[in-house]
Image (spheres, rainbow, N blue to C red):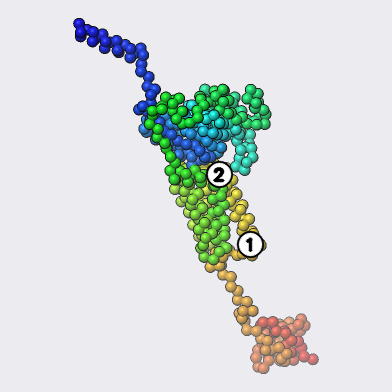
Amino acid sequence: MRDRRLLYLVITYFILLVLFPNNHVSGKNDLVYYATIDSEVTNGLTEYLNRAIRTAEENDAEAIIFEIHTPGGVVTAAQDIARLLGNTNIKTIAFINQNALSAGAYISLNMDEIYMVPSGKIGAAGVITQDGNAADKKAQSAWIAAMRSAAEQGGRDPIYAVGMADESIEIPELGKEKGEFLTLTATDAKKVGYAEGIVSSKEELLQILGLQHANVETIDKTISERIAEFITNPIITSLLLTLGSLGIVLELYSPGFGIPGTVGISSFLLFFYGHYIAGLAGYESLILFLLGVGLILLEFFIPGGIVGFIGLGFVILSILLTGESMLQMGISLGIAILVAIIVMVIFMKFFRKKVRIFDNLVLRDATSSDKGYVSNKSRTDLLNKEGTALTPLRPSGTIIIDNERIDAVTEGGFINSGDKVVVIKVEGVRVVVRQVN
């Protein structure tokens, strides 16, 4: 009887487990990773987020939370980050701690859930070029489509995402008029379904997610990733290329090798290092750059210009291949070359500087007469002396002075042999005579 009751209890227990499963919500054994997007969106940031997502996948994390506070950044970098988010099976959560603007809004929309602090904002995602002007219609159209797609994949009404990127859209219920980009506050974002909730802290977010007891691991940026993130900023990229070009140009006007050359080479090496860490450049770009520099130096010893032009082409190509966008890198390189040309013109025209590197390669000395060099001995000793025409002078011929045969010319007339002549002018070895009446 007792055994039968025990059997009934066991059967009842399993039936209850099937009908009322024990859902795991405490998070006691869950692993959550925490990463930050707290700067401009650059290609260097992509490498950091790639490492964060890869770490979460390798450790079978429950979720990865991205704390976001960014003014935006490079569109291509934001699209790369969106692909990383779309390719992972880990739950991604955007915690907008203040602002997710421009590219930051696009990244947030590509995550599974969005939470915002009460003062948070998301939007203002218009596309502008590196010089601060509006992008062309083709780029704007592609970006608007990307914003729409990101909203639709998250099950959100795309009209608001389009309004963030298209200033021609009107959304009266949110006070958006034509000529401005939509920016949602935390309250508006929750109202239109662009935020799952409003929280004041990370701890409150974990509690809402049911992960308050989870093991939270923060993924910090390494020094290399911080350097790469800084260097791949378009402004810093242009600055490094400009410093590199200026350093090399100024070194051409300096004796020996000094500070300008060191700064120039260091700027170029730092440029390649940052893009290599960001995953944008490989050793082939650096090798191509060094090969180009070598060919340019070789041009100093091999005249013709072809080797130098090939080397210059290699240098330009290596820099263009280093960036993800050849157009953007071309703009940065163009600025650097323009500044370098202006400085060269200023040094040559206003300061009368010469390129000293050519001093050891080009022969600048001249055997001029004022330095004592003469090609033949001057016969100034014959001036005003008289002699006799040995041959007819018509107008050139031979005369004899003090038993010395001398080639001479007349002023233009003819002198017969045997006539008396006098030397009236000596120009080097040219002896001019006149007939003596």
Mark 1 to mark 2 CA distance (whole Å): 31 Å
Foreground of the two, 271 or 225: 225
The residue wearing badge 2 is: 234
Instruction: Check the picture and name the quadrant holding the N terminus.
Output: top left
Q: Are marks 1 and 2 in contact (CB under 8 Å)?
A: no
The residue wearing badge 1 is: 348
Q: Report the amino acid beneath label 2.
A: Pro
Tell me if residue 302 comes above or below residue 391 in the rendering. Answer: above
Q: Nearer the viewer, mark 1 or mark 2?
A: 2
Q: Position of residue 79 (x, y in %)?
A: 52, 34
Q: Work out whether mark 1 precedes mark 2 in sequence or the reverse, and give the earlier one.
A: 2
Q: Which picture quadrant has residue 75? A: top right
Q: Position of residue 211 (x, y in %)?
A: 41, 27
Q: Is residue 299 among the parts visible in the rendering? A: no
Residue drawn at x 65%, y 27% is 176
Q: Is residue 259 among the parts visible in the rendering? A: yes
Foreground of the two, 191 or 255: 191
Q: Which picture quadrant has residue 382? A: bottom right
Q: What number is the disc on residue 133?
A: none
Label 1: which secondary element: helix
Question: In the orientation shown, which residue stands out farthest toward the bottom?
Answer: 402
Q: Position of residue 14 (x, y in %)?
A: 30, 13
